[in-house]
Image: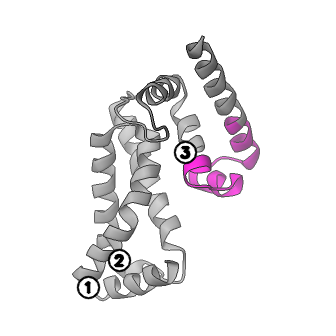
Amino acid sequence: MEDKLKMLVLQIKDGNKDAFTEFYRLTVRYVYSIVYAYLLSNEDTEDVIQNTYLKLYVIRKRVNPEKPILAYMKRIAINYAFKQMRQKKKVRIKEVSFANDEGTKELVREALKKLDEKDRLVLALHYLDNASVKAISVLINEKEGSVKSRLFRARKKLKEVINSEKI
């Protein structure tokens, strides 16, 4: 898939709008899942997604097709998500897609509400995106040790909340 994205990026740089549409179609679910895990709001996530792809289109001529484009998209999206969160100053939970049944989904929603925003983001990047601690540290501008600690604390708190809700 990375080769196809590189090809599309080259075409986008040349102003091919169909290539941009195809690029969007291939990448939007991936970017959406990362942003949603942080913002936990469909409406806010859609705003961030729109801004992310608009930014990519505006700077398309400066994008290096030899660099991993998904990492670049993730960085843009996370920056916009941070900005969105700062503007909103609140967290809204609407949908969580990690679970299959409604009872489990609700339990996860409630547990996620009790986590710090960065803890939610680190969990999402690690478990939904399979990002390494090193990659996460680069994305959120924290030291690897801080990311490890954040992951440990977030998992522990999530487990505590879920266990206390089940009783």
Residue drawn 33% across and 55% down? Answer: 49
Which of disc 1 and disc 2 is earlier in sequence?
1
Relative to 69, is 92 on the left or the right? left
Asked whether the residues under the numbered discs 3 and 2 touch, taking CB atoms below 8 Å apart as contact, a structural biologist would say no
For disc 2, the neighbor class at 10 Å (few under 14, some 14 to 19, many from 20) is many
Residue farthest toward the front in the current orientation of the protein: 101
- Real-space Cα separation, disc 1 to disc 3, in angstroms: 33 Å
Q: Earlier in the sequence, mark 3 or mark 2?
A: 2
10 sits to left or right of 14:
right
Image position, residue 96 (x, y; %): 42, 37
> Which label was assigned to residue 15?
1
CB under 8 Å between callouts 2 and 1? yes
Q: Residue at x 34, y 37 (%)?
A: 41
Q: 110 above or below 120?
A: above
Q: Position of residue 71 (x, y in %)?
A: 52, 65
SS for callout 3: helix
The kind of residue tagged 1 is Gly
What amino acid type is highlighted by mark number 3?
Ala
Q: Which residues are magenta?
A: 125-151
Residue 165 screen position, x and y as percent = 56, 15
Question: Disc 3 to disc 2, how far (Cα)?
Answer: 27 Å
Q: CA distance from mark 2 to mark 1?
A: 8 Å
- Characterize the local packing of mark 1: few (<14), some (14-19) or many (20 or more) Cα atoms within 10 angstroms: some
Q: Which residue bears the numbered disc 3?
A: 124
Residue under the point 44% across and 32% down? 101
Which residue in the protein does label 2 denote? 60
The residue tagged with tag 2: helix, strand or loop? helix
> Which tag, 1 or 3, sits closer to the chain's start?
1
Identify which amino acid the numbered label 2 is placed on: Arg
Which element is circle 1 on? loop
